[in-house]
């Protein structure tokens, strides 16, 4: 049975058109997007082939950045680079290179990525040297290729080097972008050199401590120093003082009423004051400045009492009694720092609970303070 000509011609035409579109994509358009993949095109021109390749690569990167800034589902997410087709031609004494790069937008947000700027610089310098070395070898092999003694082995080596160059350039362009001042300034990624390693913190706290009575609530002032051996972990040492707030409380014996019911006795709570020293372990989540803190400490203080016995005329003289107390404690807190771990001034909030030795159940604790990281 004969095959109809149209059945053969149509597939051939389809294959030809598809091949032509793939071959000339970056000669006709600057970029395309398919789902999470942005294909960016760049053009470079120079008398030197290596420079033309570099310029075409940089042009493709700039095209990607321009497109990414226009898309809300791109700017906040990390990406990977997949090198695609590179075509170069020699025209009017210049090498003209067309470069296609695929940028695959991942589901991983930039904020969750921690980067070491010094390590990035070392990797970028190393990759640049490798690229230069591969380009020099390609130039030498291209010269041999033009001669009549070109061998199949050199062709295979050339293909391998071209592939290696594409991979190295893909890595280098990602490192170059991560190292750029524009990317660092935007704060998209979490750069470790921007995270504070030391900090001073001054804060105001409320603590439902019940040290001396069930009605006692405390106001505390605390100063702390923190050292972070790792970006995600800190060790904190702190000290401060607190004052208890009680019902039926008088600040001094002068505030106690000297006139009262005849032949009666009244008792008044006096000031409650104590010092607080301790240490804390801080774990940073890396997400929007949130952290978790475990603290352990010791308090030492005193409480005053005022007793008044009124005579037949209802006149009394207050007497003061002082009791001392001390206790150790432990607690857990969830915190938020407005600086998002970066150096400089910030405000932080903490909510949690503490339990001291003589307390039946943990008491609520909340705090507000300022933080200076450096």
Image (tube, rainbow, N blue to C red):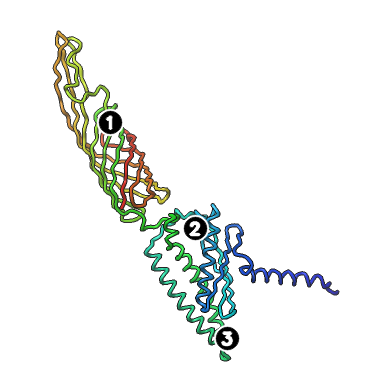
- In the image, which is nearer the foreground, mark 2 or mark 3? 2
Relative vertical location of residue 367 with respect to residue 13 in this rendering, above or below: above
Horizontal relation, residue 95 to residue 361: left or right: right
The Cα–Cα distance between marks 3 and 1, rounded to whole angstroms, is: 87 Å
Horizontal and vertical percent position of residue 110? 46, 55
Question: Closer to the N terminus: mark 2 or mark 1?
Answer: 2
Question: Closer to the N terminus: mark 3 or mark 1?
Answer: 3
Horizontal relation, residue 123 to residue 226: left or right: right
Question: Closer to the N terminus: mark 2 or mark 3?
Answer: 2
* Residue projecting furthest to the top: 312
**Disc marking residue 78:** 2
Q: Residues within 10 Å of mark 2 (few under 14, many from 20)?
A: some
Q: Secondary structure at mark 1?
A: loop
Are circles 3 and 1 on residues that touch, CB within 8 Å? no
Quarter assignment of residue 361: top left
Horizontal and vertical percent position of residue 29? 62, 65
**Disc marking residue 305:** none
Are circles 2 and 3 on residues that touch, CB within 8 Å? no
Q: Secondary structure at mark 2?
A: strand
- In the image, which is nearer the foreground, mark 3 or mark 1? 3
* Residue projecting furthest to the front: 92
Horizontal and vertical percent position of residue 73? 54, 53
Q: Which residue is mark 1?
A: 210
The Cα–Cα distance between marks 2 and 3, rounded to whole angstroms, is: 41 Å
Q: Which residue is mark 3?
A: 152
Q: Residues within 10 Å of mark 3 (few under 14, many from 20)?
A: few
Image quadrant containing the N terminus: bottom right
């Amino acid at each position: 049975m004969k095959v109809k000509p149209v059945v053969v011609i149509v597939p051939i035409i389809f294959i030809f058109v598809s091949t032509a579109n793939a071959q000339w994509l970056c000669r006709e358009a600057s970029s395309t997007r398919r789902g999470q993949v942005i294909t960016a095109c760049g053009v470079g021109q120079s008398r030197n082939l290596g420079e033309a390749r570099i310029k075409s690569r940089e042009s493709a990167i700039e095209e990607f950045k321009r497109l990414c800034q226009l898309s809300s589902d791109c700017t906040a997410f990390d990406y990977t680079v997949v090198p695609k087709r590179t075509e170069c031609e020699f025209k009017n004494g210049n090498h003209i290179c067309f470069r296609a790069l695929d940028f695959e937008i991942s589901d991983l947000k930039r904020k969750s990525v921690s980067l070491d700027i010094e390590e990035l610089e070392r990797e970028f310098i190393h990759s640049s040297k490798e690229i230069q070395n591969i380009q020099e070898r390609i130039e030498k092999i291209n010269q041999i290729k033009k001669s009549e003694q070109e061998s199949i082995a050199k062709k295979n080596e050339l293909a391998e080097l071209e592939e290696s160059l594409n991979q190295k350039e893909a890595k280098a362009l990602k490192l170059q972008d991560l190292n750029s001042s524009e990317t660092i300034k935007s704060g998209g990624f979490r750069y470790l050199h921007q995270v504070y390693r030391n900090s001073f913190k001054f804060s105001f706290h409320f603590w439902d401590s019940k040290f001396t009575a069930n009605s006692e609530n405390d106001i505390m002032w605390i100063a702390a120093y923190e050292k972070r051996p790792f970006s995600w972990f800190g060790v904190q040492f702190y000290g401060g003082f607190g004052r208890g707030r009680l019902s039926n409380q008088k600040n001094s014996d002068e505030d106690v009423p000297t006139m009262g019911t005849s032949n009666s006795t009244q008792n008044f709570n006096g000031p409650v004051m104590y010092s607080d020293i301790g240490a804390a372990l801080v774990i940073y989540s890396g997400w929007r400045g949130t952290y978790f803190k475990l603290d352990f400490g010791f308090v030492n203080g005193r409480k005053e009492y005022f007793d008044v016995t009124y005579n037949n005329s209802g006149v009394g003289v207050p007497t003061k009694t002082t009791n001392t107390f001390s206790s150790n404690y432990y607690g857990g807190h969830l915190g938020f720092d407005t600086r998002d771990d970066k150096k400089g001034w910030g405000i932080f909030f903490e909510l949690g609970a503490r339990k001291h030795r003589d307390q039946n159940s943990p008491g609520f604790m909340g705090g507000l303070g300022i933080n200076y990281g450096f």
